[in-house]
Image (spheres, rainbow, N blue to C red):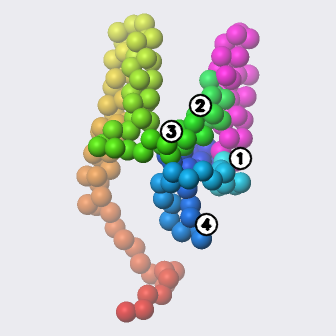
C-alpha cells in the first residue's frame, strides 16, 4: 500500500514537471529523474515487502527468482518505461508501453499450465481493465461534493 501511495506514476508514463513546478507535461527533452517524488519510499516499501515474502520461501532458487523479478519490476521498469514513453509518444492511439504490457500479459497467459489458472488470469484481467473503470465511471453519479468552513475561500 505504501508503494502505491508513494510511487511517481507520472514519471513512469513519460511526464516530467516543468522547471516552475507546474503541471506535468510529456517531454522529449532529457531531464534527470527528480531526486525525491516518493521514489525512494516506494522502492523501499516494495523491497521490504519482498524481504518479508521471501522469508517464507524454502527454496534458494525460488527466492532468487522472486527477488530478481521484483528488482526488475520496481527498480528498472519505471525508468525504462519513462524512456520508452519519452522517445515514442502515443501516435494514433498506439503506445509502445501498451504493446509491451499486452505482450507480457499474453506471455504470462501462455506460461500458465491449467485451464483453471488461465480462466482466473483472464477473469482478473477483465475485472481490472474493463469492469473496474466502468464501475468507477458509473459510480461518479453518486459522488457528493462536501463543502464547509474547512474549504479555501473562493472570491466570486
Q: Residues within 10 Å of mark 1 (few under 14, many from 20)?
A: some
- What stretch of residues is rendered in magenta? 40-68
Separation (CA) of disc 1 from disc 2: 15 Å
- Taking the spot 71% from the left edge, 54% from the top edge, the residue there is 35
How far across and how far down the image is residue 106, in percent? Answer: 39, 20
Among the two numbered marks 4 and 2 on one chain, the one whose residue lies closer to the N terminus: 4
Among the two numbered marks 1 and 2 on one chain, the one whose residue lies closer to the N terminus: 1
Which residue is identified by label 3? 84
Among the two numbered marks 1 and 4 on one chain, the one whose residue lies closer to the N terminus: 4
Which residue is identified by label 1? 40
Separation (CA) of disc 1 from disc 4: 21 Å
Among the two numbered marks 3 and 2 on one chain, the one whose residue lies closer to the N terminus: 2
Closer to the camera: disc 3 or disc 1?
3
Can you name the residue that lies furthest to the bottom here?
156
Separation (CA) of disc 4 from disc 3: 22 Å
Which residue is identified by label 4? 19
Which residue is identified by label 2? 73
Q: In the depicted view, which residue is nearer to us: 93 or 69?
A: 93
Closer to the camera: disc 3 or disc 2?
3
- Taking the spot 45% from the left edge, 11% from the top edge, the residue there is 111
Among the two numbered marks 3 and 1 on one chain, the one whose residue lies closer to the N terminus: 1
Q: Is residue 2 above or below residue 16?
A: above
Q: In the depicted view, which residue is nearer to us: 136 or 70?
A: 70
Tell whether position 43 is magenta: yes
Amino acid at each position: 500500500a505504501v508503494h502505491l501511495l508513494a510511487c511517481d506514476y507520472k514519471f513512469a508514463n513519460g511526464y516530467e514537471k516543468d522547471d516552475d513546478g507546474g503541471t506535468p507535461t510529456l517531454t522529449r527533452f532529457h531531464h534527470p529523474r527528480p531526486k525525491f517524488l516518493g521514489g525512494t519510499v516506494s522502492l523501499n516499501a516494495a523491497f521490504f515487502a519482498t524481504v518479508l515474502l521471501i522469508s517464507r520461501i524454502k527454496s534458494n532458487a525460488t527466492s532468487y527468482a522472486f527477488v530478481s523479478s521484483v528488482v526488475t519490476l520496481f527498480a528498472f521498469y519505471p525508468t525504462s518505461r519513462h524512456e520508452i514513453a519519452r522517445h515514442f509518444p502515443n501516435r494514433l492511439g498506439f503506445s509502445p508501453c501498451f504493446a509491451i504490457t499486452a505482450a507480457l500479459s499474453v506471455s504470462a497467459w501462455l506460461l500458465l499450465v491449467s485451464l483453471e489458472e488461465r480462466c482466473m488470469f483472464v477473469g482478473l484481467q477483465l475485472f481490472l481493465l474493463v469492469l473496474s473503470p466502468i464501475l468507477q465511471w458509473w459510480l461518479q453519479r453518486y459522488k457528493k461534493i462536501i463543502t464547509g468552513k474547512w474549504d479555501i475561500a473562493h472570491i466570486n
